[in-house]
Amino acid sequence: MATQQQFRDFLSDIEPSATTKSDASPRHTELRDFLAADAEFKEHHVQTFLSGSYKRDTAIRPRILNGTVARPDVDIIVVTDYTLEDDPKDVIDAVFEAVQRLKNKRTSYTVIRRQARSIGVETTTVDMDVVPIIAPEGMEETLYIANRKYESTSEKWLVTNPPGHTAWTVEMNRNSGGRFKPLVKLMKWWRRENPTISKRPKGFVIECIIAQCFNAEEADYERLFLGALDAIVSKYEPYITARIPPQIADPSVPENYVTSGLTFDAFEGFYNKVKTHAEIGEKIRTETDPDEELKLWRKIFGDRFPAAGGSTKADGLLQEAASVSPFTFPDRPVVPKKPAGFA
């Protein structure tokens, strides 16, 4: 059995470094401040906040590509005073032009581009998605994201809830005694080490899958991770048999599905990888030779998974958790009173 210390060391290793975080902070702060002060855009600017895995603390260290550390990704939500009557193309154009004005002043901004629902920004130290949204009735009510590539009127503005995603992740982690975020990071690293052709599902979809497939009361890293693999195999087997992707509700916008853009082929590739590694997990459970067990763990997590050192053998505790009730997806949007990360 792998020690708890091995997993702690591994989680520390796959955590974004202090340098990665320090590289991201000045750029996103600069961009947010610029949007608030820009002579042309400020009349539409309400406020900004961070979103995505960077904000939710579920990000893992950037990839190393050709010997170079890839830039981290940061999502910036820009709340504007536009309305449902405005054309999303015009809204995204307005944000694009504002960021373009910043790019003209800073050599560190290398590429900006219009995307379906955001502006992609590449800099020398960090990549950012700048996402305009509107809050017609205030931040505690329904929020909408601009969809530049709409094909019908109903697709122009789509219901969204980035603050709710952050609040949901915090609640998931709290209600599981701090087990949810570490497990998500382990799963994201596993996903990176074991890609399929489509490399999906990604990001928040992984978080939602884990939310449905982990034991919130399990206090041992090994059993927590391997149990999640087993649960994924069991829960989604009927979908594989029926050859359809699962419909997983967005935890903060229940009428939406986080898997709406996921094809069956993409999900099947993911499922088959999980099933293969769940079978490796069965071998791990019965392996008594530490060296052979390490080889099996490295088939799952890659060569960064550490060998056992001088640390104390696991006593089964991830961390003490008070009585925890199983967590389920809410039946209504989760919205904090004031979204964290507001400027």
Image: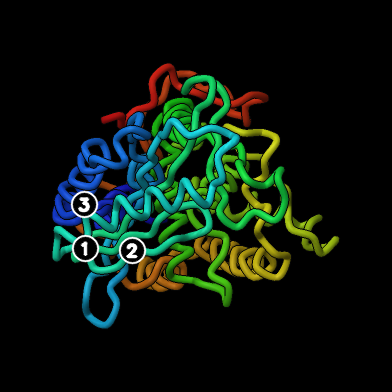
**Residue type, label 2:** Ile
The image's mark for residue 336 is none
**Residue type, label 1:** Tyr
Helix, strand or loop for disc 2: strand
In the rendering, at what x and y percent does residue 57 appear?
A: 34, 42
Helix, strand or loop for disc 1: strand
- The answer to whether residue 265 is above or below residue 173 is below
- Distance (Cα) linking label 2 and label 1: 8 Å
At label 2, counting other C-alpha atoms closer than 10 Å, the crowd grade (few under 14, some 14-19, many 20 or more) is some
Q: Of the residues under marks 1 and 3, which one precedes in the sequence? A: 3
The image's mark for residue 112 is 2
Circle nearer the viewer, 2 or 3: 2
Left or right of residue 318, residue 233 in this image = right
In the rendering, at what x and y percent does residue 293 appear?
A: 42, 67
Check if mark 2's residue and mark 1's residue have beta carbons within 8 Å. Answer: yes
**Looking at the image, which residue is at 60% across and 57% down?**
149
**Looking at the image, which residue is at 49% across and 71% down?**
194
At label 3, counting other C-alpha atoms closer than 10 Å, the crowd grade (few under 14, some 14-19, many 20 or more) is many
Q: Which residue bears the numbered disc 3?
A: 24
- Distance (Cα) linking label 1 and label 3: 13 Å
Q: Residue furthest right?
A: 242
